Image (cartoon, rainbow, N blue to C red):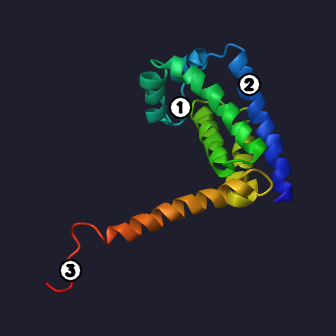
């Protein structure tokens, strides 16, 4: 958990600063998305698209909704970084960081994404240990208690519903 803390803080800083730069710097994904459609990843042996469904997603959903994408990418990067730095919902933050990195790679960008996938995968697989020295130490027991309590209430009331048949019939 101690080693994961340092990895998490560094990785969180990287995500946070990239997201902040995009939030404050007039980020637009339109050129990136157009390039992903114009020059998709193609299998050199067969000359076929490697990720045809992802290319179709970019062309038919992401590009027509580029304003939403322009907001979601920087905000997502910023929130992943914030979650990792604070150690709050760290497994979810690592998961969504991985998801974004895979999306970038499906679109044809390699740069630091393989490193981010490797580090993010380690943080994700470490699970609760990733946030042990963070706000998850306090948050996760509370959430477990909250959800367990709701499940216990639902299970108790399930037997007392209208379908309950009295024993004497």
First of labels 1, 2 by sequence position: 2
- Quarter holding the C terminus? bottom left
- Residue furthest to the bottom: 168
Q: Residues within 10 Å of mark 1 (few under 14, many from 20)?
A: some
Query: What secondary structure is found at the residue carrying circle 2?
Result: helix
Q: Which mark is residue 42?
A: 1
Q: Which residue is painted at 74% across and 28% down in the image? A: 18
Residue 86 visible from this viewpoint:
yes
Compare residues 55 and 129 and report the one nearer the observer.
129
State the image coordinates of residue 140 (x, y, percent, origin top left).
66, 57
On the image, which quarter does residue 86 sit in?
A: top right
Q: Of callouts 3 and 2, which one flags the residue occurring earlier in the amino acid sequence?
A: 2
According to the picture, the residue beneath numbered tag 3 turns out to be 166
Q: Position of residue 38 (x, y in %)?
A: 52, 19
In the image, taking residue 71 as reference, residue 5 lies left or right, namely right
Splitting the image into 4 quarters, where does residue 143 fall? Answer: bottom right
Question: What's the residue at 79%, 47% (across, down)?
Answer: 8
Mark whose residue sits in front, 1 or 2: 2
- Distance of label 3 from label 2 (alpha carbons): 62 Å
Of labels 3 and 1, the one closer to you = 3
Q: CA distance from mark 1 to mark 2?
A: 33 Å
Pair 3/2: label in front: 3
- In the rendered image of this protein, does residue 134 appear above or below residue 154? above
């Amino acid at each position: 958990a101690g080693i994961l803390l340092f990895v998490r803080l560094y990785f969180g800083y990287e995500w946070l600063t990239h997201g902040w730069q995009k939030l404050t710097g007039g980020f637009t994904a339109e050129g990136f998305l157009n390039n992903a459609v114009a020059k998709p990843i193609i299998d050199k042996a067969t000359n076929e698209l490697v990720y045809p469904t992802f290319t179709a997603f970019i062309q038919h959903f992401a590009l027509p909704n580029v304003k939403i994408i322009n907001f979601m990418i920087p905000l997502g990067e910023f929130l992943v970084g914030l979650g990792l730095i604070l150690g709050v919902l760290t497994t979810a933050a690592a998961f969504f960081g991985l998801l974004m990195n895979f999306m970038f790679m499906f679109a044809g960008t390699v740069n630091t994404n393989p490193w981010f996938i490797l580090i993010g995968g380690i943080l994700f697989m470490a699970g609760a240990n990733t946030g042990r020295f963070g706000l998850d130490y306090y948050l996760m027991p509370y959430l477990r208690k909250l959800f367990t309590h709701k499940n216990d209430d639902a299970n108790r009331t399930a037997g007392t519903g209208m379908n309950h048949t009295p024993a004497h019939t």
